[in-house]
């Protein structure tokens, strides 16, 4: 495997983790959105990754986003008869966003992103030192 493949692999992982971070940010921003664009409570979204085998190198795989799926867990029902979106019995269905889980996802994605940056920096340092051999 060429050392340049490290940049390709880490770049794909950084792109996938960036998508995951954007999805977490969207979920956190809509944690209290009682009504989304379709008129229903916001549904949390999750990013699904897939491994992509490198055609040129059988020992290397990159990561890609396979899709963004909606979390089908039911939202929390809250009794608030004064809320303008409450039903006739005074209940509101809140989004199914679990803020604690989203924070854990955010930390995990952030750390994975940082690890890939460090991997790229280490590969860059190794390439620069290789160029300086014999000088």
Image: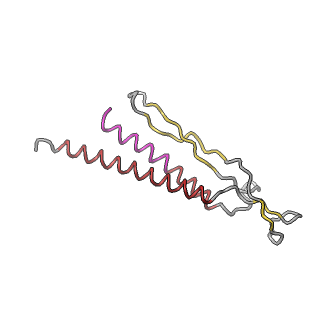
x and y percentages locating residue 16 in the rendered image: 49, 46
Q: Nearer the viewer, residue 88 or 79?
A: 79
Residue 9 magenta: yes
Query: In the picture shown, does residue 10 fall above or below 35?
Result: above
Q: How many marks?
A: 0
Residue 8 magenta: yes
x and y percentages locating residue 49 in the rendered image: 54, 41
Q: Residue at x 46, y 31 (%)?
A: 53
Query: In the picture shown, does residue 113 fall above or below 50?
Result: below
x and y percentages locating residue 115 in the rendered image: 40, 50
Furthest toward the bottom, the residue is: 82
Residue 29 placement: quadrant: bottom right
Task: Tell me which secondary structure the magenta stretch mostly adopts.
Answer: helix
Q: Residue at x 82, y 72 (%)?
A: 82
Quadrant in the picture for the N terminus: top left
| Highlighted range, magenta | 1-17
Furthest toward the right, the residue is: 88
Residue 67 placement: quadrant: top right
Q: Residue at x 70, y 55 (%)?
A: 96
Q: Residue at x 49, y 51 (%)?
A: 18
Residue 89 placement: quadrant: bottom right
Q: Nearer the viewer, residue 67 or 107?
A: 107
Quadrant in the picture for the C terminus: top left
């Amino acid at each position: 495997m060429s050392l340049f493949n490290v940049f390709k692999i880490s770049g794909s992982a950084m792109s996938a983790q960036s998508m995951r971070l954007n999805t977490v940010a969207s979920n956190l921003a809509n944690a209290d959105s009682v009504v989304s664009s379709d008129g229903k409570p916001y549904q949390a979204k999750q990013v699904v990754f897939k491994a992509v085998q490198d055609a040129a190198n059988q020992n290397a795989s990159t990561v890609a986003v396979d899709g963004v799926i909606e979390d089908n867990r039911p939202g929390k029902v809250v009794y608030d008869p004064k809320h303008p979106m409450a039903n006739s019995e005074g209940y509101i269905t809140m989004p199914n966003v679990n803020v604690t889980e989203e924070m854990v996802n955010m930390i995990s994605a952030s750390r994975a992103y940082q690890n890939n940056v460090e991997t790229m920096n280490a590969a860059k340092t190794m390439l620069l030192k290789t160029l300086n051999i014999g000088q």
